[in-house]
Amino acid sequence: MTAQDATPPKSTSGAVASFKTAVGDAYQGFFDITHNSLALLGTLAAVALITLSARADLRASAEEQLLGWLLERQEAASVDAVYAAEPSAVDRVTAAQPGDLPKQQANVTYWLSRKYRVAPEPLSALVAEAFEVGEKAKLDPTLILAVMAIESRFNPFAQSPVGAQGLMQVLTRVHTDKYNDFGGQLAAFDPVSNLRVGARVLQDAVKRAGSVEGGLRLYVGAVTTDGNWYIDKVMAEHMRIQSVALGKPMQRYVPQARPTTVVAPAAPAPVAAPAAEIEAEGPAAPNALPPGAPLTRS
């Protein structure tokens, strides 16, 4: 082997030695820094413990901050577990943008929103549905909205003492069959389902009575009274909403409903008759309605 052939191994061994020296120096430096840092942290921790032991106020403040931090972490973890994200939840909301409605419907939406203190977005969906259902049922949509306003003030979860439920206060137990098409009785608390069922009930009542006033009397189920108080309230609100929809001035005077009275024929002057003849005549024919009987209008 020549001298030239021996040179590379010496160079290689020198490079390896240099690399080992560099690694050793780096390790020693890291160890020294870590050791010194741990020593510094330990010193700071010891000083903090001594300070907290000597100062009760500082100790109480530190404990309060630590407890608050732990509670925040716990609440954040529990909220993440209970309120999981559900991006499709908006699909269940009965709402729409008022600006997307035709002008008449938008005017009605904003007016009802101000008067009944209901958000315009859910009202937009109800107003649009009332106009669509009204066209199909041959009912004025402002009449349907007036019934909702008087019955529930647009509260979809309203319930009366007799069991009328939802926006249009339909007696769910009476009209159970109508809710079958919407999945069952609980659909009474779905605003759109209740609106459709209520409009159907109102449509049937108007057809049976032959007039809107008579239909409202049947709708409210007036038995012990003539129902004029209800008819007046609904018709007044109906005319207001109609004026808003058409952009006309609000009417100040609304004609009140008048009951249809039944007048018995005039009785002839009483003539004295023998007792036997009076007994033979028997009881008089029932020309007048009995007290408390409901009055209807055609």
Image (cartoon, helix red, strand yellow):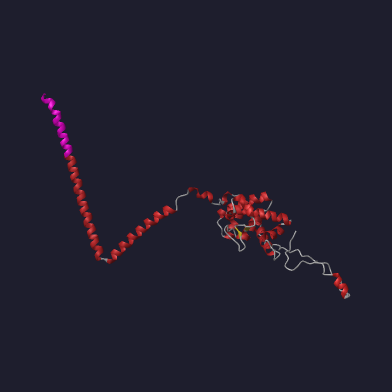
Taking the image as drawn, is residue 247 in sight?
A: no
> Residue 265: which quarter of the image?
bottom right
**Residue nearer the viewer, 128 or 204:** 204
- Residue at the spot 23% in from the left edge and 54% down from the top edge: 41
Taking the image as drawn, is residue 22 in sight?
A: yes
Residue 149, horizontal then vertical, whole percent: 62, 59
- Residue at the spot 26% in from the left edge and 63% down from the top edge: 52
Residue 81, horizontal then vertical, whole percent: 42, 53
- Identify the image quadrant of the N terminus: top left
Residue 201, horizontal then vertical, whole percent: 66, 55
> Residue 13: which quarter of the image?
top left
- Identify the image quadrant of the C terminus: bottom right
Judge whether 75 appears above or below 12 on screen. Answer: below
- Residue at the spot 64% in from the left edge and 50% down from the top edge: 133
Magenta stretch, overall SS = helix
Magenta span of residues:
1-20
Residue 159, horizontal then vertical, whole percent: 59, 61
Q: In the drawing, does residue 182 fall left or right of residue 295? A: left
Q: In the drawing, does residue 277 fall left or right of residue 196? A: right
